[in-house]
Amino acid sequence: MKLTKVEGKLNGLHWITTSLFIVADLAGGGVVAMPLAMVKSGLICGLIIMIILFVIFTYTAHMLGHNWIRMCQNWPEYTDHCRKPYPEMALRSMGERSRTFTSFVINAMLFGVSIVYLLLASKIINDIIFSLVGINIGSCLMLLIVASVMLPVTFLKSPQDFWWAIVVAMFTTLFAVILVIGGTIADYNTCTPVSYYPSFSMKNLFLSLGTFMFSFGGHAVFPTIQHDMKKPNKFTRSSIAAFFLVLTMYVPVTVLGYIVYGDSVQDSIISSLQTPILQIVANALIAVHCILTLTIVINPLNQEVEHVLNVPHHFGWQRIGVRTFVMIIIVFTAESVPNFGPILNLIGGTCVTLTSALMPSFFHLFMETRLKMIRDNVNEKKDESEIYPSIVDVYKNTKTTKLVINCVIIILSIICGVATTISAIKEMSDSQFSMPCYLKNYFDSYDSSTPKIIESFKLINCCGKYLNESRYNDINVCLNNISI
């Protein structure tokens, strides 16, 4: 097969801009959730996990980038337009069934990520209102409000094309990280002496893995981003820069959060800050990130459903009906599991493991082997669509070093993914897990759908083993000791 030179988009993304998009895709939810994961794993294990994931996921991002270049070289039609580059990569490496499975996994991941960001945005906005005016609307009711306000925005044809939104989302997260670090340092002298660190357990370790993998795994959209680059061959450079920047954002937040707050850290570390103004501004920045990301993430999911149902591309009642239905399903699921932590862990153990570790390795090994088999088949003139390698073919045609590296990644990913998924499912059925919103006693619970007005301006999430320590030396300011 004749190879062609890979040409990117004339006005495509520079490799630096591409790295910023990758950062925006990765960061956000991970910034607020990883400190709790660090508490569950322990400081040493947590740092080791972060370094390992940084190396492995950077390498798998490189493999995806290499795969895309090979696809464009061998099938030039992909250089012009490709709506679903990741599933197409599956097709060219492992066949039609692989493409179908990949599409399903990506859509499941988009669905789960939409739930996580909707829950996180609702919780943050409720916390901001509570801090400013003393009214606790409740996360359950706030979720309905946020979804209703965002629904008309999802009717737009292609909000995914608004790349400026991704850049804004990246910078809001960066500024939020700076504020969180500053707030945590301010609490150091108060909380560190009374911090309590739980004993190590394998269950908590596997649960933390889900959060860590979610925070580093955004590979499902990498081929789409690379497809829009001016020079796609520089995607590896973009990936390395992006993952390094993300690591420099994650490490200070997680390490400081662990040392200062210990197991008193909340689902979102921002809630643990004892400086109200920093907490409010950081929450607002993360809320902006969540809303922008949700708008972008939900769009390809809507388009996939419309494609299956053969909905016209022009604006009409069919689009409104389908996208409203999708939002209703997302809201119902979010109301059923009103805690983003377990969902985040479940996504990390399943979809992220597949799209960020297993699929890149399998697709890379099989595509390289298949291309070699196609080249060797020139004289036999066998139809290309009939040439797909077996595992034995991959073993025979892959260099030992590459084979060993990818096998290690595959084995580790399967073990960690299965263990994390089982742990997340058990956590979702645990007695301490949040009850669905529609089954709660709305009049007695904290997340009541009936707004309550209290004097919130002096209330904070206190630290220490018993959640009763604050920089104000007054237990009455501890939110944990107040029945809301």
Image: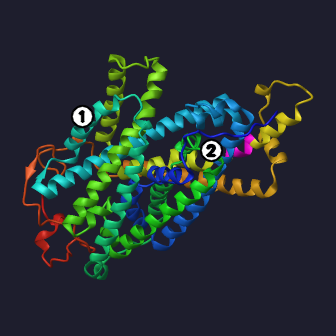
User: In the figure, residue 279 lies in which quadrant?
Assistant: bottom left
Q: Is residue 345 magenta?
A: no
- What residue is at 30 percent from the left and 55 percent from the top? 285
Q: Position of residue 151 (x, y in %)?
A: 29, 32
Dominant secondary-structure state across the stretch colored magenta? helix
Query: How far across and down, in percent of the image, does residue 478 sit?
Result: 16, 68
User: Residue 159 sits in which quadrant?
Assistant: top left
The outermost residue toward the front is 10
Residue identifier under label 1? 148
Q: How many marks?
A: 2
Using the numbered discs, state the Cα–Cα distance from disc 1 to disc 2 in whole angstroms: 36 Å
User: Would you say 35 lies left or right of 150 here?
Assistant: right
Task: Check the picture and name the quadrant holding the N terminus.
Answer: top right
Residue 279 as seen in the image, left or right of residue 237: left
The magenta span reads 362-367
Whether residue 449 can be seen here: yes
Magenta span contains residue 364: yes
Q: Judge the density around disc 2: few (<14), some (14-19), many (≥20) Cα neighbours within 10 Å.
A: many
How is the protein colored in the picture?
rainbow
Residue at disc 1, secondary structure:
helix
What's the amino acid at mark 1? Ser
Question: Where does residue 128 sit, x and y in percent of width and height?
Answer: 20, 54
Disc 2 target residue: 359
- Image location of residue 470, percent across then percent down: 20, 75
Closest to the observer, 173 or 458: 173
201 and 261: which one is in front?
A: 261
> Amino acid type of disc 2?
Met
| Residue 111 appears in the figure | no
